[in-house]
Amino acid sequence: MPQLITKGIPVEAMRSVSAALVEELASICECGTDNFTIDCLAVESVFDGKRVDTYPFIEVAWFDRGRSVRDRFAEAVYRHVRQAGVPELEVAFKTYTEDAYYINGVSCDA
């Protein structure tokens, strides 16, 4: 945790920036790089009966770290993905609470 779930971004683009991105995000979040996962989903988008390109989107699932950290995190994600050749990107955060998150059947707030 955090987990980045990408849509509409080529896997090679994410692979090319993943190491530097995770290093920076770990610094921002003050945690180890081994806390991060990046999942690149292959999706097909449709509109008006036709297949269309999927808009570049990253959902970040995490424990809330406050607005300042969230702002820095989102900016870093955008900057790195832009360097990989993706000019536009939306980032959204899904926040988990420790009492509702379980690892191996044990609540994180235990």
Image (tube, helix red, strand yellow):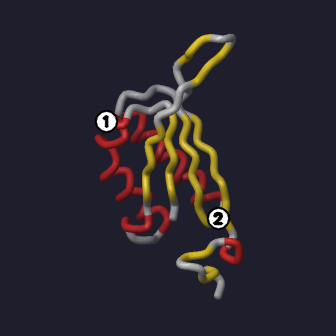
Dot 2 corresponds to which residue?
Answer: 64
The count of marks equals 2
Q: Residue at x 51, y 28 (%)?
A: 88
Depth check, front residue: 101 or 81: 101
Q: Quadrant of residue 13?
A: top left
Residue that protrudes farthest toward the bottom in the picture: 110
Q: Is residue 102 left or right of residue 17?
A: right
Q: What residue sits right under mark 1 in the picture?
A: 12
Asked if 71 appears above or below 11 in the picture, the reply is below
**Vertical comparison of 23 with 78: above or below:** below
The x and y percentages for residue 73 are 52, 53
Q: State the residue at coordinates (51%, 61%).
A: 2
In this rendering, which labeled residue sits more in front, label 1 or label 2? 1
Marks 1 and 2 close (CB-CB < 8 Å): no
Type of amino acid at the residue the image marks with label 1: Glu
Place of residue 59 in the rendered image (x, y in percent of width and height, measured from the top left): 58, 46
Amino acid marked by disc 2: Asp
Residue 7 percent coordinates (x, y):
51, 36
* Residue 26, image quadrant: bottom left
Report x, y in % for residue 46.
62, 19
